[in-house]
Image (cartoon, rainbow, N blue to C red):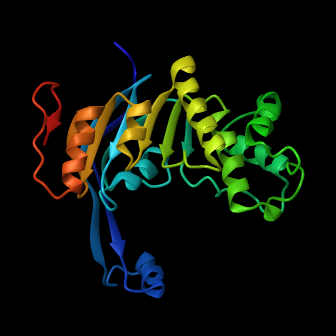
Amino acid sequence: MRETVIELKNVTKKYKLYSSTRKRLLGIFFKFIKYKEKLAVDDVSFEIKRGESVALFGKNGAGKSTILKMITGVAFPTEGEITVNGRVSALLELKSGFDAELTGRENIYLKGHILGLSDDEIKALEDTIVDFSELEAYIDQPVRTYSSGMKSRLGFAINVNIKPEILIVDEALSVGDSAFKTKCREKVNEIIEKDNVTLLFVTHQTAVAAEFCTRGIVMKNGKLVYDGEVNDASEYYKKIMAKKKPEAPKANGGKNK
């Protein structure tokens, strides 16, 4: 049986919403400051095995991004447990995490160190990352001189070439022109098939999800409402988007909670 690399057990995440930044700051120190509570994720449980490719569907506000933040360690559950086994590469905010005053090359090392790589490991990947980003002419210029698209290219190139064990993608495959988008999709497919990487792919595009994933999870209002074969999950999600009452397909053993 394949190893479980991501597991959520009865995970709930609640946020405190304050009416102003001042009250949010005061709320850290004083319990009497009033706030509203937002239930972002509500008692969610699922497992992802090594080598699985899973699409995560849901409307805006369904809890998808919160789940990603908790899996990557940016946020923590209010209740429940999350277990992650393996090096995680997250293609979320591709333009974030760069030091604007450092060059593109220096930022490769900065991000590599953040992801736990040694200097020797980064050095071995440096040329591959630069070549993939197609930024050879600019790689030794400060990142503050880069366009938004150039930063995204560099961010994508770093994350897909560090030999991740778990790859988390949040609508990040729309990077650059059509030729570069195709290159990005081919690279993701390559590392899934060649390196047995586990993929968690968050998207609204069901056709793109079908290119990479065999399984789909559908979120609605913070709850997991369907878990099954990706095409059936896509149809379930489409019915939610069309505001129809979806019925879980009967043939594939998906869970309709």
Q: In which quarter of the image is residue 143?
A: bottom right
Placement of 156 over or under 250, stated as above or below: below
Task: Say whether residue 10 is visible.
Answer: no
Depth check, front residue: 204 or 91: 204
**Residue at the image position 56 percent from the left and 20 percent from the top:** 195
Depth check, front residue: 254 or 101: 254
Q: In which quarter of the image is residue 117?
A: top right
x, y percentage for residue 200? 43, 37
Depth check, front residue: 30 or 1: 1
Left or right for 43, reference 26: left
x, y percentage for residue 228? 23, 32
**Residue at the image position 72 percent from the left and 47 percent from the top:** 154
Placement of 42 over or under 45, stated as above or below: below
Left or right for 36, reference 6: left
**Residue at the image position 40 percent from the left and 25 percent from the top:** 52
x, y percentage for residue 63? 32, 55
Left or right for 97, reference 120: left
Placement of 80 over or under 182, stated as above or below: below
